[in-house]
Image (spheres, rainbow, N blue to C red):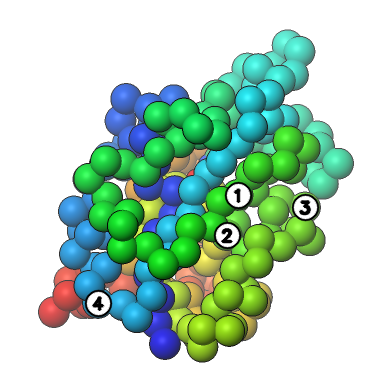
Amino acid sequence: MKALLVVDIQNDFCPGGALAVSGGDEIVPIVNKLMDHFDAIILTQDWHPAGHLSFASSHKEKNPYDTTDMAYGTQVLWPEHCIQGTNGAEFHPELHSDKAQVIIRKGFRKEIDSYSTFFENDQKTTTGLKGYLNQRGITELYTVGLATDFCVKWSVLDGIDEGFTMHIVKDAVRGIDLDGSLDAAWKEMEAKGAIITTSEAILG
Ligand code: VGL
Ligand code: ZN
């Protein structure tokens, strides 16, 4: 069985949002069309408590896009975004979020950020997605959403490690690009065995 994994298409990652990804909203109509071609639809939602330690504002003398050392390694510090219950954390209003069978929320523990849909950034704490996929007999995931070089990338890399066939739909993702991170992300995903495809190839 094949599932569409829709990563973080939330207001804060779209133009006008707190951590806007350039062109983030352009993928919404494509993702909506893709939804009809899959056995299962999984949405992820970045879902931080106020004062989350991935926010620059939670650290003295740090600015957005600086880095800091966390218990689990280096962490980029972000503008405050996707705070639980706020409009910024809602899905883009035009995304057909009603079609989702499951929503995986991540980043809800104050001390750990979570880019991947499989593991939080300590690379140990699981989100439960693997168990869900296994129990539903889903072996292939087609990944779309935001941002290519953070949550999409880590989801794809971890999905491969967890034994899934991971596809990434090139025209249905957009990136942040900090110091060349976007180019590096494509190379890493490809090197690890991610299958790069297009919406046209799926929609026919
Ligand atoms: C993301 C930075 C912080 C993402 C989430 O969805 O790629 N990036 N939180
Ligand atoms: Zn976040």
Image coordinates for residue 155, horizontal then vertical, percent = 55, 62
* Left or right of 117 on screen, residue 19: left
Quadrant location of the C terminus in the rendered image: bottom left
Circle 1 is placed at which residue position? Answer: 106
Callout 2 amino acid: Thr
> Tag 4: residue type?
His
Q: Secondary structure at mark 3?
A: loop
Q: Which residue is mark 2?
A: 117
Residue where numbered disc 3 is placed? 122
* In the displayed structure image, the side of residue 52 where residue 151 appears, left or right: left
Badge 3 or badge 2: first in the primary sequence: 2
SS type, badge 1: strand
Q: CA distance from mark 2 to mark 4?
A: 21 Å
Query: Residue at the left extreme?
Result: 204
Disc 1 marks a residue whose amino acid type is Lys
- Cα–Cα gap, marks 1 and 4: 26 Å
Q: Examine the rendered structure and indicate whether residue 28 appears above or below residue 131.
A: above
Query: Image height check: is 162 above or below 124?
Result: below
Q: Using the rendered view, name the quadrant where residue 38 is placed.
A: bottom left
Vertical comparison of 86 with 174: above or below: above
Q: How much space separates mark 3 and mark 2, taking CA atoms?
A: 13 Å
Residue 135, percent across and down?
58, 84
Decide: marks 1, 3 in contact (CB < 8 A)? no
Q: Mark 3 is on which residue type?
A: Asp
Q: Earlier in the sequence, mark 2 or mark 4?
A: 4
Q: Earlier in the sequence, mark 1 or mark 4?
A: 4
Residue 185 seen in the current view: no
* Residue with the mark numbered 4: 37
Q: Are marks 2 and 4 in contact (CB under 8 Å)?
A: no
* Mark nearer the viewer, 1 or 3: 1
User: Of callouts 1 and 3, which one flags the residue occurring earlier in the amino acid sequence?
Assistant: 1
| Picture residue at 58% right of the left edge, 75% below the top | 132
